Image (cartoon, helix red, strand yellow):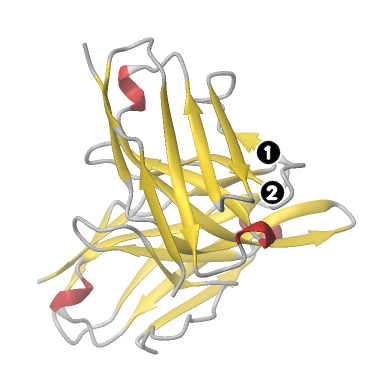
Amino acid sequence: QSVLTQPPSVSAAPGQKVTISCSGSSSNIGNNYLSWYQQLPGTAPKLLIYENNKRPSGIPDRFSGSKSGTSATLGITGLQTGDEADYYCGTWDSSLSTWMFGGGTKLTVL
Amino acid sequence: QVQLVESGGGVVQPGKSLRLSCAASKFTFSSYDMHWVRQAPGKGLEWVALISYDERRSNYADSVKGRFTISRDNSKTTLYLEMNSLRVEDTGVYYCARALRDCGGGGCSTRHFDYWGQGTLVTVSS
């Protein structure tokens, strides 16, 4: 069971918006940067959002991130079938001096 | 473009050992902390281990502590994971990842992983 809590699955229709939550504690999300990773089927994870709300070069602005206290949210607008993937949040835990991932959320674009 | 290429995976019996490698190129390997992350079949990502750019810091997930050893050779720009006393539950795809770090008065932390390898499959089975 992951220390960072994500919903197992979310779904929405093409063109719609979806949000994915990630909940932790003061030792991890509350005091460290939060990042999001997209894993398309059969591929390695890819950085999607870093430092809570920044997008790497090449990531469209349909993807956004926010953080408040010990929780974070990934938002995806204008959903496309190509967005179907597993999404993971991740952060450092200052008490354990380890990295941790959320359990992952499977996005289905209906 | 940054490249990370894992190798060394395969089928191994429980209790045996295996050594994974991650060959890095197209960046200054000796300047970056590196991590191993694994994924069991059909499961989520699990962080395994980290090693600092200068090998002074390392840490492990509780599930592998005492059995796995992370190391690096900056002259060969290669990251390693020595896995001993393997268990069935160690089965999965193992990824190496490049990390951006933050260092302050309280020590260093990892900010995020900006590049990942393609992974190498380890199967522990009798």
Q: Where is residue B9 shown, x and y percent of the image? A: 31, 34
Work out whether B20 lies above or below A51: above
Compare residues B8 and A90 and report the one nearer the observer: B8
Q: Amino acid at mark 1?
A: Ser
- Judged left or right of residue B79, residue A108 is left
Instruction: For the N terminus of chain B, give its image quadrant.
Output: bottom left
Q: Residue furthest front?
A: B75
Chain of the residue under the numbered disc 1 shown in the image:
B
Q: Quadrant of residue B38?
A: top left
Q: Which residue is painted at 35% across and 36% down in the image?
A: B8
Q: Looking at the picture, how far across and down is residue B74, in whole percent?
A: 64, 50
Tell me how far mark 1 sits from mark 2, CA to CA.
Answer: 6 Å
Classify 10 Å Cα crowding around label 1: few (below 14), some (14-19), many (20 and above).
some
Residue beneath disc 1: B58
Q: Is residue B95 left or right of residue B57?
A: left
Q: Is residue A61 left or right of residue B111?
A: left
Q: Chain of mark 2?
A: B
- Are dots 1 and 2 in contact, CB under 8 Å? yes
| B73 or B6, nearer to the observer | B73
Do tags 1 and 2 sit on the same chain?
Answer: yes
Determine which quarter of the picture holds residue A9.
Answer: bottom left
Residue B3: % across, % down: 43, 64
What is the number of the mark on residue A39?
none
Image location of residue A108, percent across then percent down: 17, 65
Q: Nearer the viewer, residue B29 or B96?
A: B29
Residue at x 45% of width, y 85% of height: A57
Note whether residue A1 is visible: no
| Disc 2: which residue | B52
